[in-house]
Amino acid sequence: MSTPDIHGIIGYTITPFSADGEHLDLDALGQSIDRLVDSGVHAIAPLGSTGEGAYLSDLEWDRVCEFSIQHVAKRVPTVVSVSDLTTAKALRRARFAQAQGADVVMVLPASYWRLSEAEILAHYQAIGSSIQVPIMLYNNPATSGTDMSPELILRIFNAVENVTMVKESTGDIQRMHRLHVLGEGQVPFYNGCNPLALEAFAAGAKGWCTAAPNLIAPLNLELYAAILANDLERARALFYRQLPLLDFILKGGLPATIKAGLRNTGLEVGNPRLPVSPLDDGACKQLERLIAALS
Amino acid sequence: MSTPDIHGIIGYTITPFSADGEHLDLDALGQSIDRLVDSGVHAIAPLGSTGEGAYLSDLEWDRVCEFSIQHVAKRVPTVVSVSDLTTAKALRRARFAQAQGADVVMVLPASYWRLSEAEILAHYQAIGSSIQVPIMLYNNPATSGTDMSPELILRIFNAVENVTMVKESTGDIQRMHRLHVLGEGQVPFYNGCNPLALEAFAAGAKGWCTAAPNLIAPLNLELYAAILANDLERARALFYRQLPLLDFILKGGLPATIKAGLRNTGLEVGNPRLPVSPLDDGACKQLERLIAALS
Amino acid sequence: MSTPDIHGIIGYTITPFSADGEHLDLDALGQSIDRLVDSGVHAIAPLGSTGEGAYLSDLEWDRVCEFSIQHVAKRVPTVVSVSDLTTAKALRRARFAQAQGADVVMVLPASYWRLSEAEILAHYQAIGSSIQVPIMLYNNPATSGTDMSPELILRIFNAVENVTMVKESTGDIQRMHRLHVLGEGQVPFYNGCNPLALEAFAAGAKGWCTAAPNLIAPLNLELYAAILANDLERARALFYRQLPLLDFILKGGLPATIKAGLRNTGLEVGNPRLPVSPLDDGACKQLERLIAALS
Amino acid sequence: MSTPDIHGIIGYTITPFSADGEHLDLDALGQSIDRLVDSGVHAIAPLGSTGEGAYLSDLEWDRVCEFSIQHVAKRVPTVVSVSDLTTAKALRRARFAQAQGADVVMVLPASYWRLSEAEILAHYQAIGSSIQVPIMLYNNPATSGTDMSPELILRIFNAVENVTMVKESTGDIQRMHRLHVLGEGQVPFYNGCNPLALEAFAAGAKGWCTAAPNLIAPLNLELYAAILANDLERARALFYRQLPLLDFILKGGLPATIKAGLRNTGLEVGNPRLPVSPLDDGACKQLERLIAALS
């Protein structure tokens, strides 16, 4: 197994729907992927939280997975989120993504029942032993209800051979410190909390998993470039410049705000699926102003 | 619309699987329902948290719904949990349950994305306006990730005509006080937190939604009888007697502990679906001891 | 050592100040004590949270302690709060209270630094071994910053001979269950959370530690009488009747609300010490209305 | 009023006691101050959390305040913590510190009762209008029990003329972002959470308030120098090098760990005041090892 070099700005795609919300709009999906790739992001991540993966039928999920991988066409690596409520279903998605050519799959232990540490480990082992592509372990208790301590993450990292990357989205920088210290600097970690972007890079994060490049890719990429150039002052200035927008999309919810923002640019991608509502008019206006202030 | 009188002990059913976990075992489901009804519970609630409703395919869910309602056959009312991740899918389940003859449907605003109050209200309105049977609103942030304040619950109760009951599972007795005070005593509330059973009844809960009757129905029913008889001392003694078991099933997880407990009695109902694990041997032994101590 | 029978309604006294806030008003203190004793409370507790014990100089504290015990004059038992930030100072207060004739001293592990379990145990041991009167252990993380688990409380109860009572103020009824179960029914526990009064009695609390009797002693006493009479329905009705006031005094802060309430009845007791502010006019009016509604 | 330029490493002093814990050891205090000043820290902060200010009698507090300021003798600025449980006592301490020549006073709204925003603002106004030296507002809910939102901090900053600096110790980097954004970059903020040192500087903190220089001043100073040199990679390496020690002193409690560490170097400063215990033997050994690994 060769692990692709996942780093920098990992751009999360939305899943466009038709106006009635009932059908996928793959043409719009292709356009949104092209925009991201053309902007220079270092990887593309379909079907994550932003991609409403949890709200798709199995058929829809498969279609988006297949289309996205084919459309990216290896221009950059693809990181496909394959989480589902049962181990069997997550495993099926992981195999499907692998068969379509995904470079990495991302696994969040989403569950209805609170899982024990043994159950979480077994979940990763079951998936890991069924596929050959590398796995990005994903911790995000705010959406999954399951919080994995750095100690547990390390246990899984050491026990499951193809878990080779960690995405941390708690927003607690001490988790990253702990991963660095416990993992003796050998655990590649990625930040999934937008308003922590500056400090996660300061702490040594290898990449930033974010939907923001759908709207402001140049600023996201410049921040990463400043980090690579070891220019903290420039990174700080760039970060504070984009922070109001990062806060806004976190607070407004990623599918709703990114879809509204794309519509503003002329790319119609439909609304999020209910019960998630589209942004109301006031919020759309505020988003327009925030983005206008950045250009 | 005539609301059935839902009160007392509302027994939650498990969903039995075959040994390989892949198929439903409706025969075992029928037996477990008969046990509950014969024991004297006041209502039957299929497909709740205990029933692993979140882990079933749509086909499985429909089959369990239809079978359960037919098998109860109006011996007592049925309260069917119809939660799902999108409004459209929850609505489909609600209509299906109504068509099969459910007396009440229960709705938990399960979501991946944290919902706003407006989104939660719209979710209940969409479901409420599509069916005629009464709805039991269900608040359980520990599994759903969505916490509804008593104020929001009251708003929904007042805005959606067929939301006529509230199930509160936070375990915070002040929520029930608030529902009582804000609702001027007119909002029927039910307790879904097993170790709060005594105090919820003391505070005026109309019923106790619980999987415990699968294992210790007589004790659950006697506690309710003591409350009806206004005999607090007896209720307290009965409560403390069953509390160790109530704590155990809460801590061990309802599907895992109830399925293990039924197996102990000779009714094989399979294991929970992964990633939820069955009880290990030590926990099974502890469960046996706890139940033996009660008989 | 004979432990007095502390039970029922334990009334907490305020500490009256002169109009400029600088001097004690012992005459008003005597009157407020007489009101409580005459109303029928089962014990008097000076210098607790309500009594602003934390805000008094050592000289003031000693004076209030001595005066209160003498003025109660064994009409009912006195429970004197002797908490202070260092072990040495808490110990000095405990000895002083004992010398003045306190029947019980209450100890809250107030600290600036978060204490370890070993430090908390040592604190109780140091005080316990220096006095002969019984100690009521007091858990109230909201004011002390230190939360003692039921397990730790039991350890202290078993390790320190004169720790013979537990006051629980977290508002979490499961703590009381745990004290009952772990202590095999032999640990007398008291409730310090006003809006939990009904359920704490339902769970077996031996008494209710409260400042409310300064304003509505008859209702507090009737609730306890209903519990003694095993009349849950009456207890529930009485509880819900007084709950709005109980919520109000918890939310407004005990010294501020109780002092405002006493002023309304014609007993001028001054204001709380800054930074705690007296109730503003709107809140005073609301308090008047709440009390008027109860008479 | 001219505000001194408080920046960089602000070193917090311990308060040495005699072996029996009953008397101040001013000679040792002088030595510990000299060590800090000689090591190159940019300011000295007596009587903070590390200095056990909350555990001293008024006489002791005054003596330490006077001695520390005289001993520093303007070699660097002094920042004196003047917090106390009542406004009157905090105000007295603030005036005393000013009279002794403190350059800055630090105010934490320590309280027994949870304070409202209006009460906290009034507390700062009362102190601010009584002194002329600048005030560093200090937010540390873990020890004070009072959490001030960035919005409230800004209100106080704008309302009280001599509140000119903010020390944030929640460990939540988003608070610093918010102070920066709301304050339009004009609010100087300082970090009081040791394991957040790297990221706070990355986010623009002007200084680091820390007791660590008592033990590892060169490393603390080098981290700051790397930040000034805009060398993030070096800052990161230096931070991770000292992080295990920073975590240790946070977890072990500042007075206990710093006093143990100074003893290891031959400077006997006594133990913390009970109920805070000195480090046990195992922890002392671990501390020795951690420090040895850094030299």
Image (cartoon, coloured by chain):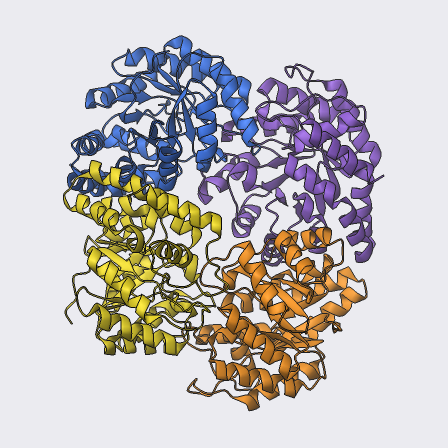
Chain colours: A blue, B purple, C orange, D yellow
Q: Residue at x 33, y 78 (%)?
A: D92
- Res. B230 visible in picture: no
Left or right of D139 in this view: D235: left
Q: Position of residue D90 (x, y in %)?
A: 35, 74
Q: Residue furthest top?
A: A99
Residue at the location (34% across, 64% down)? D48
Tell me where residue B14 sits by quadrant. top right
Residue nearer the viewer, C117 or D173? C117
Whole-percent x, y for residue C192 in the image:
62, 65
Q: Residue furthest front?
A: D266
- Seen in the image, is D54 located left or right of residue B58? left
Tell me, yes or no, if residue D34 can be seen here.
yes
Nearer-the-camera pick, C32 or A172: A172
In the image, residue B241 sits, relative to residue D156, either above or below, namely: above
Image quadrant assignment for residue B256: top right
Q: Position of residue C226 (x, y in %)?
A: 77, 66
Counting every numbered tag in the picture gives 0
Q: Residue at x 27, y 30 (%)?
A: A263
